[in-house]
Amino acid sequence: MNQDDLRQTLVASARAMQTLGLNRGAAGNLSVRCGDGFLITPTGLPYDAMQPADIVPMALDGTWRGARKPSSEWRFHRDIYAARAEAGAIAHAHAPFATALACLRVDIPPFHYMIARFGGACVRCAAYATFGTQALSDAALAALDGRCACLLANHGLLAFGRDLPHALDLAVEFESLCEQYWRALHIAPPVLLSDTEMEAVLEKFKSYGQ
């Protein structure tokens, strides 16, 4: 896609996060790799009011162009693109179930085999840091080591994929798993899959999908 197409797709994807129940109002943010940098949603602008011209182009050195300021969380977007070549788009959401679990500061254990979808036998919760800071970006990168999603303590979820549809799909799947884990905890501690069982699933996921 050219930049104009990416801007339009980014706005549509950001609005889809609301429709899918991942975000409300101006919460969360979304970006897509573009050339040597990336495009990111602007700070504090409700998705319903957002237009393609509002999308902010950024370079990996943290500079940006245009009339709008980038999302306050631009640092972890920049750092993920710099560190993870496979990241083509990034979704950050204050999704209700993921955020509830993030407030408990717990990793999501292998209660369901689909946890392997995100790269390992658990999905980690990053250490708490103030939003928009380099400390938060550093914590997120550590939690994402070998993974494509994590929780951000007392904050929300973060996921990246090869492109915008993939990143959005992963965010939706992760929120669904968070809901399932939250519901299971209301009955009893879930029975967790063993390391051997998760290793088998992780191997199968190497050839999963189209």
Image (tube, rainbow, N blue to C red):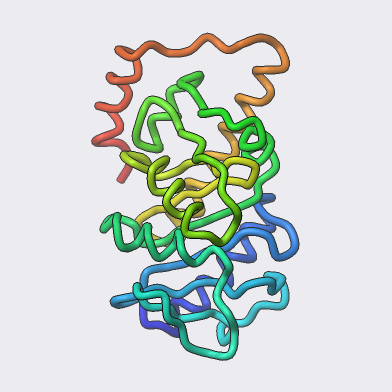
Residue 24 appears left or right of 179? right
43 left or right of 49 in image: left
Q: Report the label total.
A: 0
Between residues 8 and 146, which one lies in front from this camera angle? 146
Residue at left 42%, top 40%? 143
Residue drawn at (28%, 19%) of the image: 200
Rendered view: 190 above or below 69 = above
**Where 103 falls versus 189 (above or below)?**
below
- Does residue 2 appear left or right of residue 182 in this picture? left
- Please state the horizontal and vertical placement of residue 68, each as a whole percent of the image: 59, 84
- Which residue of the protein is positioned furthest toward the right in this rendering? 25
User: What residue appears at the point 44 percent right and 76 percent down from the top-left corner?
Assistant: 6
Q: Nearer the viewer, residue 165 or 14?
A: 14
Q: Would you place residue 176 above or below residue 81 in this image? A: above
Q: Quadrant of the N terminus?
A: bottom left
The residue under the point 54% across, 63% down is 73
**Residue 63: image location, x then y, percent:** 42, 81
- In the displayed orientation, state which residue is furthest to the bottom: 67
Tell me residue 12's x, y (percent).
58, 69
Q: Find residue 142 and report its horizontal and vertical position in percent.
A: 38, 43
Which quadrant of the view contains residue 205? Answer: top left
